[in-house]
Amino acid sequence: MEESSIGSDSWRTFSDAVIRDMEQQDWLEDVVIVNESPDERVVGDVSLFRNAGDACRRLEQWWVEDQEGFAFTASGARLILAVDASNNVVVERREACADGTDIIKGWLRSSANAMLEARRQRARQGKINLGEAETRGVLPGTIEGLIAYLGFAR
C-alpha cells in the first residue's frame, strides 16, 4: 500500500511538471517579439506584444513591405509577416528556427540592458526608485523574466 502511494505521489509530481511545461510553452507561443532592424542578429527597437493579433494591428503595412524588421514568438518560432488584400498586416506563416530562442534572448537582453541604464538615469534624477536587483545590475536570465522586466507594448 505504501509503495503505491509513493508511486502515485511521484506520478503526480511528474504530471504537474509536464502540465506546467505545456502551459508555459503555450504562453510563449502567443507572445510576439518584433525587432526593427535590417539584420535579425542586430538589435534595433524591440517591441513585445501579447499575441500576433496585437502585433499585426500595431505594425504598419509599409514596415512589412519594406522588410524593416523581424518577428518571432517568445518560443523561438520565426513569424513571416505579409500584407493582405485589405492592407492589413497578417502572419502568413510560422517557421521553426533552430536558434530562434538564442536570437530573441539576445534581443531581450539588449533591450533590458538599455532599459536598466535608462532607469538608472531616472533614479539619479530622483524620478524613480530602483529595486535591489536593478541596483546591483542583475537582470532576469530567462525569456519569461526578461519579458516581465520589459513589459508589453500598449
Image (cartoon, rainbow, N blue to C red):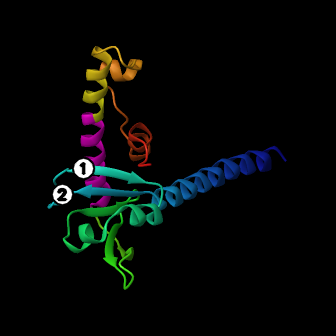
Q: Residue furthest bottom?
A: 85
Q: Which residue: 38% across, 22% down?
A: 133
Using the rendered view, name the quadrant where residue 117 is placed: top left
Where does label 1 land, which residue? Answer: 45
- Taking the image as drawn, is residue 137 in sight? no
- Taking the image as drawn, is residue 141 in sight? yes
Using the rendered view, name the quadrant where residue 33 is placed: bottom left
Q: Which residues are magenta?
A: 99-114
Around disc 2, counting alpha carbons within 10 Å, would you say few (fewer than 14), some (14 to 19), or many (20 or more)?
Answer: some
Q: Residue 86 magenta-drawn? A: no
Q: Residue 106 magenta-drawn? A: yes
| Callouts 2 and 1 close, C-beta under 8 Å | yes
The secondary element bearing badge 1 is classed as: strand
Q: Position of residue 90 (x, y in %)?
A: 39, 74
**How far apart are the two marked residues, 2 and 1, measured between alpha carbons?**
7 Å
Q: Which sits in the foreground, 105 or 81?
A: 81
Using the rendered view, name the quadrant where residue 60 is placed: bottom left
Residue type, numbered disc 2? Ser
Q: Residue 87 — which label?
A: none
Where does label 2 land, which residue? Answer: 37
Residue type, numbered disc 1? Asp
Q: Which sits in the foreground, 98 or 1?
A: 98
Q: Position of residue 34 (x, y in %)?
A: 31, 57
State left or right for residue 134 relative to residue 117.
right
Question: For the image shown, how many numbered marks are present on the structure?
Answer: 2
